[in-house]
Amino acid sequence: MKESYLSICLHRISDEYSPAYPPIPVKVFERYIKFLKCKYGFISLNDLQNNKTNKGGILLTFDDAYYDFYENAFPILQKYEVPAVLAVITECADTGKSFWTQELNKIIEAFFKEKRQNELSKLNFLKNHSLSFNSVEQTALEIYKILLPIKEKNSALMELKTLLGKPVEFTKMMTWKEIKEVHKAGISIASHTVNHLNLTTLNDEELEYELKQSKTKIEEELNTIISVIAYPNGEYNDKVLEFSKKTGYNFAFSVENKSFQITNKDFQIIPRVLVYHQKFWKLCLQFIKLRIENH
């Protein structure tokens, strides 16, 4: 029987209070890294690409390349000699600025902090929608789902900023300087597209740009071949898979609660278990026990 592996998808590792998108606290992250290494072990992207590993284990991935990966997660990974994959949004790496979902979260948090959340109903892009405004997390998620299928989100974000009427400090992202440093230290790099859009909503030209331009940009910056992509939000369809193969990707990360086995195919989808909050670690550990220990 082939060995089963599990890939975990993480985002922010920080002690920052952010109710709309709660990061995993640093000490909690370190505690689980120690436990998982001792109990199950980790595999690297290189192991996966070259089919070098002969025992089950965990593939650790981080999406978006937040600065707190560099500041908080990276030192812990080095301390315990744990391999990982960092999926980079090239537009964010170029500018150091966060992308639209993080801007949305921070703006919604600001409205709730000032107890002005009911004003959100005045927004033009929300006129045909009914929102609850019960909590920051729920409201941010509801608006996120409304904006997700819309290609041009800047006008909606600008309307939100104008209504708020004050500047908001957005989440800091890694630039090429930090990305080059972690890559040189052994962190594997994957594409996370140019703008973190839902690839299933794009036309052929837009899809080709997001897949090809991000791959080319990372290869130019790091002087290495990029053959792995993490689909934004884990979303893909047959066209996305077809274009990914044509662009030269060999592996694609999705978001699905299941384990995987290494194949000899030219292209393989790697499902990942999403862990974006401290409480999900417990569920993740239960899943690991079920999927790895029972194989």
Image (tube, grey):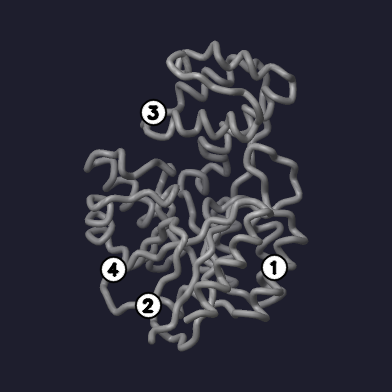
User: Which residue does the numbered mark 4 point to in the structure image?
Assistant: 267
Q: Amino acid at mark 1?
A: Tyr
Foreground: disc 3 or disc 4: 4
Label 3 element class: loop
Q: Which of the two discs, 3 and 2, labels the residue nearer the N terminus?
A: 3
Sequence order check, earlier mark of 3 and 4: 3
The residues tagged by marks 1 and 3 sit, at their Cα atoms, a distance apart of: 39 Å
Q: Could you tell me how far apart the alpha carbons at marks 3 and 2 are, in whole angstroms?
A: 38 Å
The front one of 241 and 209 is 241
Residue behind mark 2? 262
Q: CA distance from mark 2 to mark 1?
A: 25 Å
- Cα gap from disc 1 to disc 4, whole angstroms: 31 Å
Residue wearing tag 1: 32
Among the 4 quarters of the image, the one containing residue 266: bottom left
Mark 3 in CB contact with mark 2 (< 8 angstroms): no
Are the residues at dot 2 and dot 4 in contact (C-beta closer than 8 Å)?
Answer: no
Residue corresponding to mark 3: 152
Looking at the image, which residue is at 65% across and 77% down? 37
The Cα atoms of the two marked residues, 2 and 4, are separated by 11 Å
Q: In terms of sequence position, does the residue under pointer 1 or pointer 4 come before the other?
A: 1
Frontmost of labels 2 and 4 is 2
